[in-house]
């Protein structure tokens, strides 16, 4: 049981716990990258996640599908949308990104994002709540770290400062990254 071993090393030996993890050298990962002129033919739908900062929104567009009984994801695009979310212009850029048309490599058909999650943590929470509340298929998320925090939980309802209610999805970031 790693929990007991971790406790022993920390409390009895007074040493930090260091978990054995496989690492990938950045150069090796860079060499494995692929570029896509079109959405790969195995992709079934597109979604995105956005992270707000004080001076920008960063959006990652992903494709997903079930392939041979396993869920497979691919990053198709990463966009840095410059501007303070308090000003609202950067949300116009995000709206434009949400309407981007992607060509499916297998069918030649047009695909768009079916939904995006947008992180409501940080200093622009109320702006994110307003954005999500006034758009379809935009979901407020909030990452929660820590060992044992599940990848997802049942959504909760949060009251905004303006008195509106938004649905908030908690994501266990450590579980999702492992």
Image: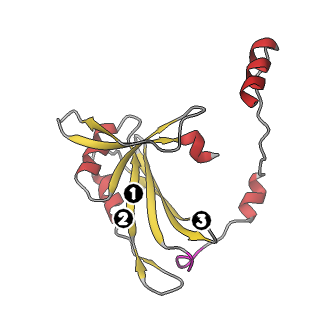
Disc 2 crowd, CA 10 A, few/some/many (<14, 14-19, 20+):
some
* Residue occupying the far left of the picture: 163
Q: Are marks 2 and 1 in contact (CB under 8 Å)?
A: yes
Q: Which of marks 3 and 1 is in front?
A: 3
Residue in the picture at 53% in, 83% down: 105
Percent from the top left, x then y, of residue 62?
A: 51, 63
In the image, which residues are magenta? 36-42
**Picture layout, residue 104 above or below residue 125:** below
Q: Which of 95 and 151 is in front in this view?
A: 151
Residue position marked by numbered label 3 in the rendering: 72
Q: Are marks 2 and 3 in contact (CB under 8 Å)?
A: no
Along the polypeptide, which appears first: circle 2 or circle 3? Answer: 3
Q: SS for tag 2?
A: helix
Residue position marked by numbered label 2 in the rendering: 98
Decide whether the magenta segment is chiefly helix, strand or loop.
loop
The question of residue 38 being in magenta is answered with yes
Q: SS for tag 1?
A: strand
Residue 138 left/right relative to 40: left
CA gap, disc 2 and disc 3? 22 Å
Residue 157 placement: quadrant: top left
**Picture layout, residue 41 above or below residue 45:** below
């Amino acid at each position: 049981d790693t929990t007991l071993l971790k406790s022993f090393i920390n409390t009895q030996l007074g040493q930090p716990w260091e978990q054995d993890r496989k690492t990938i050298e950045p150069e090796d990962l860079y060499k494995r990258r692929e570029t896509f002129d079109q959405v790969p033919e195995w992709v079934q739908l597109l979604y995105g996640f956005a992270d707000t900062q004080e001076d920008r929104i960063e959006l990652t567009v992903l494709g997903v599908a079930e392939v041979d009984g396993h869920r497979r994801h691919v990053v198709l695009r990463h966009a840095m949308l410059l501007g303070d979310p308090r000003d609202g212009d950067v949300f116009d850029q995000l709206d434009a990104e949400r309407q981007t048309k992607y060509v499916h490599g297998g069918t030649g058909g047009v695909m768009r994002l079916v939904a995006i999650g947008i992180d409501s943590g940080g200093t622009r929470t109320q702006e994110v709540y307003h954005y999500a509340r006034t758009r379809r298929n935009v979901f407020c998320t909030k990452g929660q770290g820590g060992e044992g925090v599940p990848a997802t939980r049942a959504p909760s309802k949060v009251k905004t400062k303006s008195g509106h209610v938004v649905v908030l999805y908690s994501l266990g970031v450590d579980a999702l990254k492992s």
